[in-house]
Amino acid sequence: MSGTTDKPRSFQEIILRLQSYWAGKGCAVMQPYDMEVGAGTFHPATTLRSLGSKPWAAAYVQPSRRPTDGRYGENPNRLQHYYQYQVLIKPSPPDLQELYLGSLRAIGIDMEMHDIRFVEDDWESPTLGAWGLGWEVWCDGMEVSQFTYFQQVGGHDCHPVSGELTYGLERLAMYVLGIDHVMDMPFNDPDAPIALKYGDVFRQTEQEYSRWNFDVANTEVLLRHFEEAEAECKAILEQDHNDPKTGKRIIMAHPAYDQCIKASHIFNLLDARGVISVTERQAYIGRVRALAKQCADAFVQTDAGGAAA
Amino acid sequence: MPDLLIELFSEEIPARMQSRAAADLQSRMTDGLVEAGLTYAGVAAFSTPRRLTLTVQGLLAESPTVKEERKGPRTDAPEKAIEGFLRGAGVSRDDLEVRAEKKGEVYFATITKPGRHASDIVAEVLEQVIRNFPWPKSMRWGAGSLRWVRPLHSILCILTDDAGEVQTVPLEIDTLIAGNTTRGHRFLAPNTVAVTSFDDYQSKLKRAHVVLDATERADHIWQDATNQAFAAGLEVVEDKGLLAEVAGLVEWPVVLMGTIDAEFLDLPPEVLQTSMREHQKFFSVKNPKTGKIERFITVANTQTADHGATILAGNQKVLSARLADAKFFWENDLRVAKSGMETWTDSLANVTFHNKLGSQAERIDRIAALAREIAPVVGADADLAQQAARVAKADLSSEMVYEFPELQGLMGRYYADAADLPNDLGQASEEHYSPLGPSDVVPTAPVSVAVALADKLDVLTGFWAIDEKPTGSKDPFALRRAALGATRLILENNLTLPLTPVLARNVQNAQAAAQRHWLDAARDNNSHQGGVLANWIRGRSDPVPADPASFLGKIKEVAESLKGDNHAPEEVTQIIYQDLGITTADASMVATDLLSFFHDRLKVYLRDKGIRHDVIDACITMTGNDDLALLVKRATALSDFLKTEDGENLLQGFKRANNILTQAEEKDGVEYSYGADAKFAETDVEKALFKALDTGEPAITTALKSEDFAGAMAAMAALRAPIDAFFEGVQVNTENDIIRRNRLNLLSRIRQICLQAADLTRIEG
């Protein structure tokens, strides 16, 4: 253990250090998925790749949207758009906890000065039909990560088990950098000729999206989009596995899963608009889960899903 | 005799599971060892966040040799049978013994099972224990199939003999091989350590910054916390549950005391305490002079060069963010409260209470009506009780209760006070959930009692109306607790409240709410029931009927059209009803069923007060059994009476009378209830009994009428001697038929008089 670690000075430096740390540990550093999602788990590099028998190791930043958390950029740590850092390794290596602690050291958290705790927190995603056991990791009483051993995804038992790490980047960075309000956090090097704070990048968008999410988004259009995404997902999966044009076996698990992601995000938007009653909520979640399960069923029949060719 | 040491070293075990797991490890291991013939002198189990440890002292070095005798076939049995027996017993023919038995000569085999080494047995038992460990929730990890609460990293399993010689038990489970090493604290001493005995293990762990014993960790935390608080003139708010949990989160507890920012000190102490406990697992530290919470205690799992300064600063920052939230909720809530809480009560219309019973607002309407009805019985003002019921659940819409559900009721009190409502209302908000458990305090303020009782009766009648009763160990809506709570409210406040009419009326109201709900569902395509119904009804291109009665009619029509070859329309209707959660049971039947549920709870309650179940049974069959206070008065008087000598003997006399009478009535095929005539009395004892009954009967009847059960029992006690003397001196079944019949009629009179007080036929013994 090295006693002193030089401290990062900006939000992006923390991201860069995590990227290079996990690249050094053999993860494929992937890019964010190009769709609106509520959490890094929705990235197919986690949801789909945690299924089946093929080994996998990936790390990536995922911009995540939670419309109901919008506070017009005024709350010191609540945002409707934020970043998660996600690591998924299958099978989970025996030293995953040590690897994780190494990543904290890499971003300047010195274990000799801080109190790191693994506190029980079981993870469940009703929309993905997924659950796992693990912890939230506390640093001096603050939750800095979620640590989960996936047991089931899309209704399928995970064999082998994936280890998933999720870092809430803004919160973690604020802690490491000693910042009280997220908008005051240096985004790039504070000594750069054009030094930008998080607020310079995101304050205005938080306002714009908060207004749209809560008051303007056209719910009729959203409801229709939800139905369409659901129908398209099912339609994709109902296609013959054998492509008549190429004559190849092509199961379209990923395009179908895109529609599932879309339905899930539209549901979140509808929820933020307050048009979904408590009883309906469960029904909508159930519909998204049904899609996620069908996508999982399709993926495990593909090559990447470990199906024998 | 060797000592055994086992340690199962894993990733962090949830705090709430640790002590139970240690106990399970101990009982399962020792059960398995003893079953295999290994007895021991002493045992103890320990847990930390990363390990379960078991030490067994004075274990047998090997299991004793066991001899077992087995009876075989007769000596003249077919050769095949004898060979089969030899194979089964694992012996040769020379080992057999021949014994003469009644049916001839028979072979006997003695099978000797040699003792086995402790290490073999331990390995076998431990493997079974690990593979079948009763974790509340377990998981797999990596590519393996072993299950544990979190990934299991190593197994330490050694036997140490009297000479100090250490043997590692040969055990391999999947990829894990048992050894003689462990690890210290995750950060302070992460290297492996070899150990030779339990004492060696425990002391090496301590040097490696691990306190093995959870009790020792808890004691240390509590002592250090109280000392630090004392030094600052403060005291720690006791919280045993939190202490146990925190002791399960650390291997090396370091107690740190921090301050709470001044801007949060005006929050209600319960809010501070709950927020700190739930989110941060902090203890609250209060100023004994003001009662205010001013500081917190956190327990770190490590010691640092700056004596925890960085850790404390971090914790303080997190706390400030949390309390800023709480303060935000509190201030928003106070604004709503001061403006009259209407926003909250209105919004409860959108909160579902149960999907078959409608919204919280509908439920509150029912509670308010019920509280109004009960008010005169408890001596509360009816308007006030009704208003209190409307206010009592308003805090369910507050932001604070949304964040901390356990503060419901208490926040209601703060908000009612902030709204300047009468004190009775605030008090009812706070108290109406009580009593929660059998030892919880029962409210006594009239308005609180009215609302608390109405709340519980509504829950019970509601779930009875939709046929969601508790079954076996399943009671998801805590209905047993509600019934016991209502019972205690009635009894401990000595309320005269016949339940049947109240229950029946409320069942009807709940059924009406359920009916409204199907109608709503029928108009709402999105709900499940709605979908099912709408399909039926739209399929017939009829509009959805507007009122429950024609709606039920419509269902019948649908059922008629759906009937198959094997199903009558009634059957189909029942299936639809079931699917929709519609009950059409008669409300008074439902109320009767619910009353017997109350009686069951009452039996449990009275049993704890030393009243036998048969005594209660004897009283439950009497009229007025829906007035629980009356019922208990009767049962208590009877119970006390039966404990006296007079009571015990009167009971015997009654039983004798009843037996003779029942037999005679059965034999003769008549009921001897014509009334006995004193002029046929032959003997003095008989005459004396007539006289005693003539005096006793009106006394007993009058006492019972005025519900003076003790008085009635005292009057019954006076009958004991004449009845005893009667049986002593008189034979009932005499030759003279007139006299016999008169005597039987006399017995009938005794029976009738006694049965007025209670159904003594149900008393055992």
Image (cartoon, coloured by chain):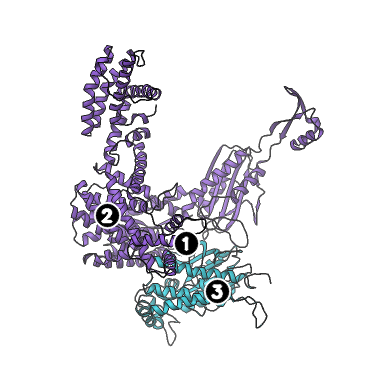
Q: Nearer the viewer, mark 1 or mark 3?
A: 1
Residue A17 or residue B561, whichever sits in front: B561
Q: Are marks 2 and 1 on the same chain?
A: yes
Q: Counting residues from the N terminus, which is met first, the one under dot 2 or under dot 1?
A: 2
Chain of the residue under the numbered disc 2 shown in the image: B
Please tell me whether mark 3 sits on a helix, a strand or a loop: helix
B123 versus B689 height, above or below = below
Distance from Cα at disc 2 to Cα at disc 3: 49 Å
Q: Nearer the viewer, mark 2 or mark 1?
A: 1
Badge 3: residue crowd in 10 Å (few <14, some 14–19, many ≥20): some
Q: Is residue B40 visible?
A: yes
User: Among the chains, which one is cyan?
Assistant: A
Distance from Cα at disc 2 to Cα at disc 1: 52 Å
Badge 1: residue crowd in 10 Å (few <14, some 14–19, many ≥20): some
Q: Are marks 2 and 3 on the same chain?
A: no
User: Residue B524, position in %: x, y?
Assistant: 38, 68
Instruction: Name which residue type carries label 1.
Output: Leu
User: Residue A44, position in %: x, y?
Assistant: 55, 74
Instruction: Name which residue type carries label 2.
Output: Glu
Residue that carries the numbered disc 3 in the rendered image: A44
User: Among the chains, which one is purple?
Assistant: B
Which mark is on residue B729? none
Residue that carries the numbered disc 1 in the rendered image: B562
Tell me which residue sits at (41%, 50%) in the image. B475
B380 versus B709 height, above or below = below
Question: In which quadrant of the rendered image does the N terminus of chain A lie?
Answer: bottom right
A144 versus A256 height, above or below = above
Residue B226 or residue B146, whichever sits in front: B146
Question: In which quadrant of the rendered image does the C terminus of chain A lie?
Answer: bottom right
Please tell me whether mark 2 sits on a helix, a strand or a loop: helix
Chain of the residue under the numbered disc 3 shown in the image: A
Which mark is on residue B430? 2
